Amino acid sequence: MSRRPSAFRAIDAVSRRPARMLSRLYFDISVVGDEHLPADGPFIVAANHFSHLDPPFIGFNAKRDIRFLAVDELFGRSRLFDLTMKYYAAIPLDRDGYPIAAMRAAIDHLESGEAIGLFPEGRRVERWGVDDPKRGAAWLSWMTGAPLIPTAIYGTQHSLSPIDRGFNRTAVRLWYCEPLWWYDYADRIDPIGSMTADWFDVVDRHLSDWMDL
């Protein structure tokens, strides 16, 4: 899928702030750490994933366009969903095969100075920590030099999620954490694995105190 059409980018420039305000009012969204997102240049947002609401909430509050990777099995089920994915220029990701085209598109986007978002768990989960994280986010950071921003989101498991499919009002907590840089892992035996493990630990520190509430 190509980069977001210019007409959609113009709409987003006008609607981003109102959408952010309305989402924060309706869902009581608390955002911490947006100063960790670079004002310019490429970066990678890697977040845990409970709900269909995670990409727009993360994107609305980032203050910069984030192009997300989305598993290809989601496409073609709903015209509204497909239009939304076109609006955000989402990159289809083959979860079960070799996502060569998706990774190439993500690298091209990062090398043009833009931001990429993805979910290392690979799918919406009922509970944090159920699945081992995939290594794609760290691999992209290693290949492009872009900082990896660990991102934790809590509360969306109560709306449009595998355990609660309704569109429900809920409090949401969102943390953008300090970036991880590829060069800090250059001396590791498995630098991509080590970076992925640190991503998990950072997100876990933010979620673990909330998961039993």
Image (tube, rainbow, N blue to C red):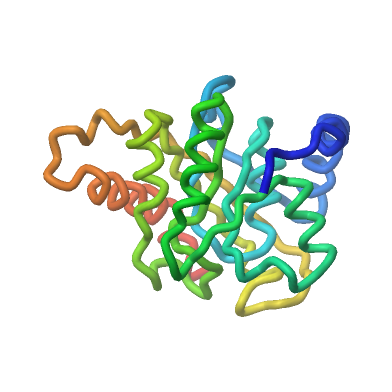
Looking at the picture, does residue 197 appear above or below residue 78? Answer: above
Of residues 111 and 58, the one drawn nearer to the viewer in this rendering = 111
* Up/down of 159 relative to 30, above or below: below
Count of number-bearing discs: 0
Q: Is residue 212 above or below residue 69?
A: below
Q: Is residue 87 left or right of residue 133?
A: right
Indicate the position of residue 171 as horizontal and vertical percent values: 68, 58
Residue 40, image quadrant: top right
Position of residue 30 in the picture relative to residue 13 (left or right): left
Q: Residue furthest front?
A: 101
- Residue 106 position, x and y percent, is 52, 41
Question: Foreground residue, 81 or 101?
Answer: 101
Residue drawn 83% across the image and 38% down it: 8
Q: Position of residue 164 (x, y in %)?
A: 67, 77
Q: In the visual, does 83 lie left or right of 147?
A: right
Where residue 13 appears, x then y in whole percent? 82, 30
Residue at the spot 68% in from the left edge and 31% down from the top edge: 63
Instruction: Specify the farthest residue to the top.
Output: 40
Seen from the viewer's position, the closer of residues 117 and 1 is 1
- Residue at left offset 37%, top offset 60%: 133
